[in-house]
Amino acid sequence: MDALADLFDFPPISRLHQDRARRIQAIIHPGANRYESGISTAAEYSLAHHALEGAEAAARAGDTATFDWYTAHPDAGATDVPVVVASGLTALPRSPISETPYYVLGPDNEPAPADLCDLAAHAFAVATDTGFGNLLDAHAVVVCLLGAKELGDTLDSWTITRLPGTVFVDHVQDPVVLARDLIHEGGHNWLNDALAATGCKIDDQARFYSPWKQTMRPAFGFLHACWAFPLTMLYTARALTNATGALYRFLAAYLDQQRTLLASTANDHARALELIRDEDLRCRLAAVHGKALAL
């Protein structure tokens, strides 16, 4: 299992995407004919969750027009993927569905400005060239670009489990950096889907020291970090071959930092993997962690 495409091509996830997308579409519009979107099953799965969240919020608010729009648009109005939107952090709503701000596609959705759409398209192309295209195609279907930052600034990014396949990221005007952060968050979405697809329940009582958070964390968060950060390390090592100047220095410093942090997790990661009962998933997590340790 050397190719990254093999690592991300996990049949239980494909089955999960298909099943969940069909079930959500049946809930939103019961009795309707099978919805033909022309997009991938992974994209249908991600967009269906937006439609479900939007329809539920509209129903609770008694907004019949918006509810009817979602029932007629199980793809949440998306005509192409990835869907790229732009929103400042203060414009994102908060609700009981998430401790962090989030964005749900809807009838008033506007695409990001052309320059940001181009930035995202170039980031996807860079990710594809470095072997991560399959990951982003299936797990970064909706990209919400947040604040514009300078190279070297702290960049915030996150995902929420209620909107799988959606990522929220700050950005700089460099697709190589954006690709790194999309890979990190897409990796989180991949692992959430993999755990759900295999029915893996991780012991909440088991805790391990996270060098990234500098605190003891539940096994779930620890394993997520030991998957997502190594993915960005593997990406960065490949991206460095074509980088120059300030970008090269930025990426090299990032990779050096991550090497040190990851090295301290070697023993604990082996113990944490014992909590993953699915052998295939456990091997994939171990493979990425081991490849990153070897950089």
Image: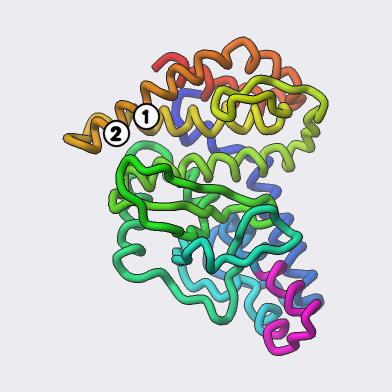
Q: Residue furthest bottom?
A: 65
Dot 1 amino acid type:
Tyr
Q: Is residue 173 visible?
A: yes
Q: Quadrant of residue 294?
A: top left
| Above or below, 40 relative to 220 | below
Viewer-proximal residue, 20 or 121?
A: 121
Q: Residues within 10 Å of mark 1 (few under 14, many from 20)?
A: some
Residue found at x 76% / y 77%: 29
Q: How is the image coloured?
A: rainbow
| Above or below, 22 relative to 217 | below
Q: Which mark is residue 215?
A: none
Residue on which disc 2 sits: 250
Is residue 62 one of those drawn in magenta?
A: yes
Residue on which disc 1 sits: 254
From the top left corner, tell me how far across and down residue 277 is, in percent: 77, 25
Q: Quadrant of residue 283?
A: top right
| Above or below, 69 relative to 216 | below
Dot 2 amino acid type:
Phe
Residue found at x 70% / y 14%: 271
From the top left corner, tell me how far across and down residue 147 is, in percent: 42, 58
Q: Residue furthest top?
A: 267
User: Tags 2 and 1 in contact by the CB under 8 Å rule?
Assistant: yes
Viewer-proximal residue, 64 or 94?
A: 94
What is the span of residues highlighted in magenta in the rendered image?
Answer: 51-68
From the top left corner, tell me how far across and down residue 41 is, in percent: 60, 57
Q: Is residue 28 left or right of residue 186?
A: right
Q: Is residue 284 visible?
A: no
